Image (cartoon, rainbow, N blue to C red):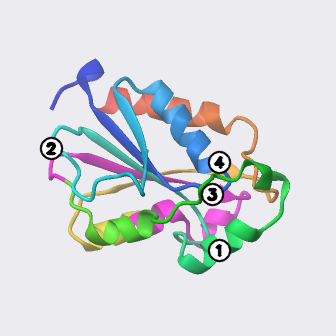
């Protein structure tokens, strides 16, 4: 696989209040040749020319979003609800992961957004996604959780942290 600037990255993201999407944009901006898609747009079979696959989702009830938690996110009023993604996603990471195929040489890392400092103590979307994909035989690393406030807004500095994390991936490849 190509090193450095020749690295081809695909970021697939699920987002309701736009927070996970903002994190994904910060990551994409820090990586050369990064392409960003929603799970609605994403291919089930990841192309062989992708070196780095980053999968992002918000944490809903200590796990990946479900149809029930999505409905809750779609109808909840909060400070962040004005930023709601339209139209709302029809398919998320949980559904995509059931059918996805990832080439053996593709480095795959999950990331998420989670509310509050202790939100990830009991579980988070990045952990749940990595576990689900590993159960299907794929090599997946669990990446970071980025913090969202109780009002569904990204905490200060999270986009900068996401960009720094993305830059660190370049040096590790």
- Marks 3 and 1, the one that precedes in the sequence: 3
Give the residue pinned by disc 1. 71
- Marks 1 and 4, the one that precedes in the sequence: 4
Give the residue pinned by disc 3. 16
Q: Which of pointers 1 and 4 indicates the residue nearer the eye? A: 1
Q: Is residue 59 above or below residue 2?
A: below
- Marks 4 and 2, the one that precedes in the sequence: 4
The answer to whether the residues at label 3 and label 1 have Cβ atoms under 8 Å apart is no
- Marks 3 and 2, the one that precedes in the sequence: 3
Residue 147 image offset from top left, x and y in percent: 68, 50
Rendered residue at 26%/28% (across/down): 7
Circle 1: element type: helix
Rendered residue at 32%/36% (across/down): 9
Circle 2: element type: loop
Give how far apart the Cα atoms at labels 1 and 4 are.
Answer: 17 Å
Give how far apart the Cα atoms at labels 3 and 4 are.
Answer: 8 Å
Rendered residue at 77%/56% (across/down): 81
Residue range (magenta)? 103-129
The quarter of the displayed image where residue 35 is located: top left
- Marks 1 and 2, the one that precedes in the sequence: 2
Give the residue pinned by disc 2. 48
Q: Of residues 116 and 153, which is closer to you in this image?
A: 153
Q: Is residue 5 above or below residue 63?
A: above
Q: Which mark is residue 163?
A: none
């Amino acid at each position: 696989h190509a090193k450095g600037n020749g690295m081809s990255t695909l970021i697939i993201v699920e987002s309701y209040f736009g927070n996970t999407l903002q994190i994904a944009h910060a990551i994409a901006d820090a990586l050369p040749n990064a392409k960003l898609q929603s799970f609605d747009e994403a291919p089930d079979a990841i192309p062989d020319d992708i070196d780095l696959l980053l999968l992002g989702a918000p944490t809903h009830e200590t796990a990946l979003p479900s149809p029930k938690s999505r409905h809750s996110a779609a109808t909840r009023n909060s400070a962040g609800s004005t930023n709601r993604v339209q139209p709302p996603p029809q398919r998320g990471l949980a559904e995509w992961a059931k059918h996805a195929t990832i080439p053996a040489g593709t480095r795959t890392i999950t990331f998420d957004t989670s509310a509050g400092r202790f939100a990830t103590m009991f579980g988070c979307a990045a952990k749940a996604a990595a576990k689900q994909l590993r159960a299907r035989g794929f090599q997946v690393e669990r990446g970071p959780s980025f913090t969202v406030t109780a009002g569904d807004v990204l905490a200060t500095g999270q986009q900068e942290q996401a960009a720094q994390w993305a830059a660190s991936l370049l040096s590790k490849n």
